[in-house]
Image (spheres, helix red, strand yellow):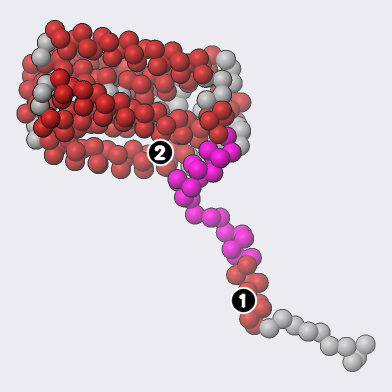
Amino acid sequence: MDKQQIIFPSEEEKEKSISFIVAKGMPKPHRFFRELYTMFQAVGFRGMFFGVGDSIFLAVLCTIFSLCGSVLLMYKSENGIVISLFLVSPFLYGIVQAMTTWKDWMTGVYEQKMVCRYTLRQVNTLRMLFFGGISVVLCIGGSMVLSIAAQNCVIFLRYLGIAFTALVLFAVLDLSVRWYCKTLFGNFLAPFFWLVLGIFMLHTSEWVASVLMGLPVVVFWIFVAGGAVVYVRMLYHWYFIKREGAFSYVVN
């Protein structure tokens, strides 16, 4: 027993062990788009839209009807072109969020989805980006059609800037309202505010149209760039919001 020797690890081995323990114990830094990609791989399209397919279908139908109504408004008034473009651009984005949230509340699965591995708030982040991308495509297509109808390709950038400005403005407004009012009523405040804004714009159509057509195009694109940065930052905090305990998930 006296001749046995205890072999201690070398300093290099100690440093490697300490580095390994620290690397495993420390939480990994949040990478927003990496987390979204990981969640999308886990839930897929079926999980992202599970149980809300009918709501999305109705939202698409309402968007089609709103586009038809806006076309009629355009023909009645020259000012109606830019006003309709501004008001309708975020329509699909907003109505999908409202109708899917309403469906989850009415079916009684909102609380259950808020305590899953990926909460409803996190899944909604994917939905926001998905339908935001579709809305961007619709804005590009609508602006292109309007510029061709006006036989003025130069005005395309102005129409596109107006459409993107409306979309970013509504997206930031919607997230802000949801952040400070985490109730069922809060999910419909942004569409309500947008409706009030639409009524105001229609009553002052000449002045609003002159402002939208008179502002330099670069102003719209600066606003779009700044709004997009704000929106992504808000989505980041929305996705990684911390709640203590399951009760907070159920209540909020």
Magenta part of the chain: 21-43
Q: Earlier in the sequence, mark 2 or mark 1?
A: 1
Query: Position of 68 compared to 202: left or right?
Result: right
Can residue 162 be seen in the rendering of this structure?
Answer: no
Q: Nearer the viewer, residue 206 or 60?
A: 60
Q: Is residue 36 magenta?
A: yes
Query: Position of 224 compared to 47: left or right?
Result: left
Residue drawn at (48%, 21%) of the image = 101
Q: Is residue 26 magenta?
A: yes
Query: Which residue, as the protein is rendered here, is positioned at the far bottom?
Result: 3
Which kind of residue does numbered mark 1 sit on? Glu
Q: Nearer the viewer, residue 101 or 77?
A: 77
Look at the magenta stretch and give its main secondary structure: helix
Q: Dot 1 surroundings within 10 Å: few (below 14), some, or many (20 or more)?
A: few
Can residue 141 be seen in the rendering of this structure?
Answer: yes
| Residue 82 picture location, percent across and down | 16, 21
Q: Which residue is mark 2?
A: 235
| Residue 22 picture location, percent across and down | 60, 65
Quick one: SS at disc 1?
A: helix
Residue drawn at (62%, 76%) of the image = 15
Residue drawn at (32%, 10%) of the image = 65
In the displayed structure, 13 sits above or below 42; it is: below
In the displayed structure, 144 sits above or below 227; it is: above
Q: Which disc number belongs to residue 15?
A: 1
Q: CA distance from mark 2 to mark 1?
A: 39 Å
In the displayed structure, 191 sits above or below 15; it is: above
Which kind of residue does numbered mark 2 sit on? Leu
| Residue 16 picture location, percent across and down | 63, 74
Q: The N terminus is located in which quarter?
A: bottom right
